[in-house]
């Protein structure tokens, strides 16, 4: 009986240890809204950052993301360019899918 308890304890400890280990490693802490405002007030305009919370496709959990505003503005038209190229190549016939 004590061997079973020992094995059960070992199994329980290993399960808990595997749950505690993260797959992606430790992520850096993202800045709070107040920290973003302060940083943007002292940083040059090309280094301003913007943070927002969104729910990614296939997930129910909101995730906070921060980006440089210059990077967001640079990639702003990229989605439309990709869509236009797909239409040219014949991958998209009609925007509504009919």
Image (spheres, rainbow, N blue to C red):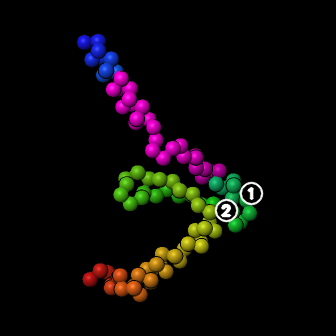
Q: Is residue 55 above or below residue 6?
A: below
Q: Residue at x 53, y 77 (%)?
A: 77
Q: Nearer the viewer, residue 53 or 94?
A: 94
Say left or right for 83 vs 32: left
Q: Residue at x 35, y 82 (%)?
A: 92
Q: Earlier in the sequence, mark 2 or mark 1?
A: 1
Q: Which stretch is magenta?
A: 10-35
Q: Is residue 66 above or below residue 18?
A: below
Say left or right for 42 vs 18: right
Q: Are marks 2 and 1 in contact (CB under 8 Å)?
A: no
Query: Most extreme residue toward the top, as rendered?
Result: 2
Q: Nearer the viewer, residue 70 or 36?
A: 70
Q: Is residue 13 above or below residue 49?
A: above
Question: Is residue 25 rendered magenta in the image?
Answer: yes
- Element under label 2? loop
Q: Considering the image in quadrants, where does the N terminus appear?
A: top left
Residue at numbered disc 2? 48
- Element under label 1? helix
Residue at numbered disc 1? 42
Q: Residue at x 66, y 55 (%)?
A: 37
The residues tagged by marks 2 and 1 sit, at their Cα atoms, a distance apart of 9 Å
Q: Position of residue 62 (x, y in %)?
A: 44, 53
Instruction: Classify mark 2: residues with Cα within 10 Å, few (<14), some (14-19) or many (20+).
Output: some
Q: Position of residue 73 (x, y in %)?
A: 59, 72
Question: Is residue 62 rendered magenta in the image?
Answer: no
Q: Considering the image in quadrants, where does the C terminus appear?
A: bottom left
């Amino acid at each position: 009986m004590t061997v079973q308890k020992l094995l059960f304890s070992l199994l329980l400890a290993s399960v808990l240890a595997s749950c505690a280990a993260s797959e992606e490693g430790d992520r850096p802490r993202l800045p709070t809204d107040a920290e973003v405002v302060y940083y943007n007030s002292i940083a040059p305009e090309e280094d301003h950052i913007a943070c927002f919370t969104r729910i990614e496709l296939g997930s129910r959990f909101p995730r906070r993301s921060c980006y440089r505003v210059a990077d967001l503005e640079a990639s702003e038209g990229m989605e439309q360019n990709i869509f236009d190229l797909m239409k040219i190549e014949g991958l998209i016939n009609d925007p509504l899918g009919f």
